[in-house]
Structure formats: structure tokens, C-alpha cells
């Protein structure tokens, strides 16, 4: 059994238009992946693909009009979908934690760093304040914050961007969670700081036998830090496997386009990496979600592509992912 098993997760946004007609945006359309201890799974895909939404759904943080309409997410055997908020709240921040993109807005501006780390430990239950402070300091040291004893007294506004991101990591790790979700954890940091933060993250995940789900649009980061990768498009996973399997032998046309795009092109397109219009979530085509942009589209693509096994743990959801044997007429 995997630590996290997400199966066919579906999320809709429901609203009413000017004429009071019901409108449904199908933002997640059957997301399926699994994550084991010690693994770092990279989730990649263009802006709007549903990466953040996937994590919010897992953590029970979706707000109306977003709603889970189907599927399952088992964490260590417990079903997260439909779990009562109080139970989910106990898991979140202790067993299952998250680091997001903007440390400034995620830290409490009115509390010193040490106090925030103590407060986080209280989510697990009563703690001795002095003991919790000692653990807070040790955690700051572990994430590579120099002069940790003094930093316990610091206010969030006194930290640089890189330091603030490390403090967030300390907050996410102080309760020794089993799964860490990192949503674009280093976006906006300069390259050197980014590498330091990710090196620390990887060392901690592997050293403690945790698992991590890392969202990024940076394929270089995935290649360097992740063991497995899942490629997302229009609210579905279109390909997944080990980083070597997927990067050496991409089986889905979208993944191939992604890998062929240059960093300059990515910067110019605002991460809408392979060009073409973003899919309209209110009117997705039946069948393959990528068909409007796919150079290999054929008539059969109007039917949903099944998972094609491309060897090992490598899967791609495309009718032409693996060459099929020739049909022989009798
Ligand atoms: N209130 C809303 N109504 C309809 N669609 C929404 C709403 N909020 C977000 N979305 C859509 O949900 C999709 C998934 O977004 P998100 O998970 O943030 O993407 P990513 O993190 O991959 O960039 C986006 O295409 C976005 O347009
Ligand atoms: S199923 Fe068809 S449209 Fe979709 S990616 Fe494969 S070839 Fe392209
Ligand atoms: Mg996002």
C-alpha cells in the first residue's frame, strides 16, 4: 500500500451565469497517482492545469464554488475525501503538511518565529514550552538557518525571502510529517538560494523516510530533485513514471512538447509551455483533453484514451502512446 493513493479525483466549480443557467467548470477530471515513502514526486504542467487545486483538494482546503465531485485520496489507508473537518484538521499540519509559494503571506506577521514554531507543535497536543522552543531551534538549524537561537526571536518582516522560505519549511517539518506537499516552493527565489532550499528539502525527505509531492513548472528542478514525475494537463494526469522513464522516453505528445520547449519560450509564454489556447474547462472536448493542440490527433482521439503501459511504472494516457501491433486481416 502506498503512503498516498489518489484515484480518479474530480473537482468542479459550479456557478450561475447571467441568465441563471448552471455552469460547471471541470477543473480536475480524474487525477490518479500514488506516492511511496522516500519518494519525491514532481507534478508538472502549464499554469491552470490543476496542480494547486489537486493539493487543496487533498488537504481539504477547497472553498465553494469548488467541490470534490468524485474519486478518492487515501493517506496511509485513511480516506481523506469526505473526512470530517476536525479529523482532517488533526492530520493537516502534523502528518501531512504543506509549503507554498509565498512565504510572506503564509507566516503570521504578528508572531515571532519561535512562537509560530511552538504553536505548530501544539497541533499535535500539549507541549512543554521550553522543550518546544528547543525543538524549534533544532529545526531551524536543520533547514540551514544560521544563528538559529537569535532567529527564534525574529519577526517575519525581518527575514529575507530565502530565510522566510526556510522558516516555512521548518514549520512544515517540525511535527515530523509523513508527507510534505510543496507548491512551487522556490518560485521567486534566486537560483542559488533555490538550489540550497531544494537540497535541504531533499536531504530531509530522504533522511527521514518521508515522502514529498513537489509542484513546479521547472523541468530542471524535477530532473534534479524528483524520483518520479506526473505530467498534468487540463485537470488530468497524462503521463507518469520515474523521471528517467518519462524524460528519456516521453510517451505523450504533450510531454514531448514540454520537453522540447526552451526556458526562453517558457518565460515568454508565461508557463503556457506548449503554445495554443488554454483548454476551456466549461466545455472540454469528449475524449482526449489535449486533442485541440495535438499534432498527432486522429479520429479515435474523440474517445477517452486508456492508460497505456510503457514499461515499468511508466504510463501514458494517449491512444498512440505505445506502438500497437499491426492489425492483420484474415
Ligand atoms: N472560481 C473558479 N471558477 C472556475 N474555475 C476556476 C475557479 N478558480 C480556479 N479555476 C480554474 O481551476 C483551474 C486550476 O487552477 P490551479 O490548480 O490553480 O492551476 P495550477 O496550479 O496548475 O496553475 C484553472 O484553470 C482555473 O482557471
Ligand atoms: S490521444 Fe490523440 S489527441 Fe490525445 S495526445 Fe494522444 S494522439 Fe494526441
Ligand atoms: Mg498553482
Image (cartoon, rainbow, N blue to C red):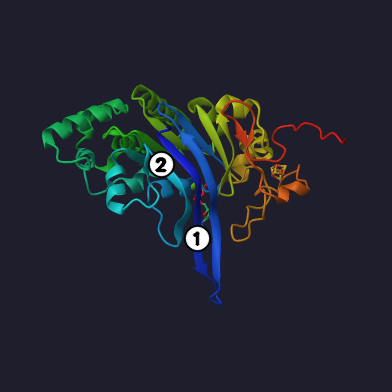
Name the residue carrying label 2.
Answer: 74
Q: Secondary structure at mark 2?
A: strand
**Which quadrant would residue 64 be assigned to in this image?**
bottom left
Considering only vertical position in the picture, is 196 above or below 50? Answer: above
- Residue 103 lies, with reference to residue 22, above or below; the image says above
Tag 2: Cα neighbours inside 10 Å, few (<14), some, or many (≥20)?
some
Q: Residue at x 48, y 33 (%)?
A: 41
Q: Which disc, if any, is residue 153?
A: none
Q: Work out whether residue 135 or residue 162 is closer to the camera in this orientation and state it.
A: 135
Q: Is residue 154 visible?
A: no
Q: Quadrant of residue 123?
A: top left
- Which quadrant of the rendered structure holds the N terminus? top left
Please identify the quadrant where the C terminus is shown: top right
Which residue shows up at 11% across the image and 36% down it? 128
User: Counting residues from the N terminus, which is met first, the one under dot 1 or under dot 2?
Assistant: 1
- Which residue is denoted by mark 1 in the rendering? 13
* Rendering coords of residue 40 (x, y %): 45, 30
Q: Is mark 1 within 8 Å of ligand 1?
A: yes
Amino acid at each position: 500500500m502506498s503512503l498516498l493513493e489518489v484515484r480518479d479525483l474530480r473537482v468542479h466549480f459550479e456557478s450561475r451565469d447571467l441568465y441563471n443557467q448552471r455552469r460547471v467548470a471541470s477543473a480536475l477530471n480524474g487525477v490518479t497517482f500514488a506516492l511511496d515513502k522516500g519518494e519525491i514526486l514532481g507534478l508538472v504542467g502549464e499554469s491552470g492545469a490543476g496542480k494547486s487545486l489537486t493539493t487543496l483538494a487533498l488537504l481539504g482546503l477547497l472553498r465553494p464554488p469548488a467541490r470534490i465531485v468524485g474519486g478518492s485520496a487515501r493517506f496511509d489507508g485513511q480516506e481523506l475525501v469526505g473526512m470530517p473537518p476536525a479529523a482532517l484538521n488533526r492530520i493537516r499540519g502534523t502528518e501531512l503538511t504543506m509549503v507554498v509559494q509565498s512565504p510572506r503571506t503564509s507566516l503570521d506577521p504578528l508572531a515571532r518565529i519561535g512562537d509560530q514554531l511552538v504553536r505548530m507543535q501544539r497541533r499535535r497536543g500539549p507541549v512543554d514550552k521550553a522543550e518546544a522552543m528547543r525543538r524549534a531551534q533544532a529545526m531551524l538549524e536543520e533547514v540551514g538557518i544560521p544563528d538559529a537561537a537569535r532567529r527564534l526571536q525574529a519577526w517575519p518582516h525581518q527575514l529575507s525571502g530565502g530565510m522566510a522560505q526556510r522558516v516555512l519549511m521548518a514549520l512544515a517539518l517540525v511535527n515530523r510529517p509523513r508527507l510534505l506537499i510543496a507548491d512551487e516552493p522556490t518560485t521567486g527565489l534566486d537560483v542559488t538560494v533555490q538550489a540550497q532550499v531544494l537540497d535541504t528539502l531533499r536531504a530531509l525527505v530522504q533522511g527521514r523516510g518521508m515522502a514529498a509531492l513537489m509542484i513546479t513548472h521547472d523541468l530542471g528542478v524535477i530532473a534534479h530533485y524528483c524520483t518520479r514525475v506526473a505530467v498534468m494537463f487540463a485537470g488530468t494526469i497524462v503521463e507518469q513514471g520515474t523521471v528517467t522513464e518519462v524524460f528519456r522516453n516521453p510517451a505523450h505528445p504533450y510531454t514531448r512538447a514540454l520537453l522540447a520547449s526552451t526556458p526562453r519560450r517558457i518565460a515568454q509564454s508565461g508557463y503556457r509551455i506548449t503554445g495554443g489556447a488554454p483548454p476551456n474547462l466549461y466545455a472540454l472536448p469528449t475524449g482526449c483533453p489535449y486533442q485541440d493542440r495535438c499534432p498527432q490527433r486522429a479520429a479515435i482521439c474523440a474517445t477517452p484514451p486508456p492508460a497505456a503501459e510503457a514499461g515499468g511504472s511508466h504510463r501514458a494516457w494517449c491512444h498512440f502512446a505505445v506502438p500497437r501491433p499491426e492489425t492483420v486481416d484474415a
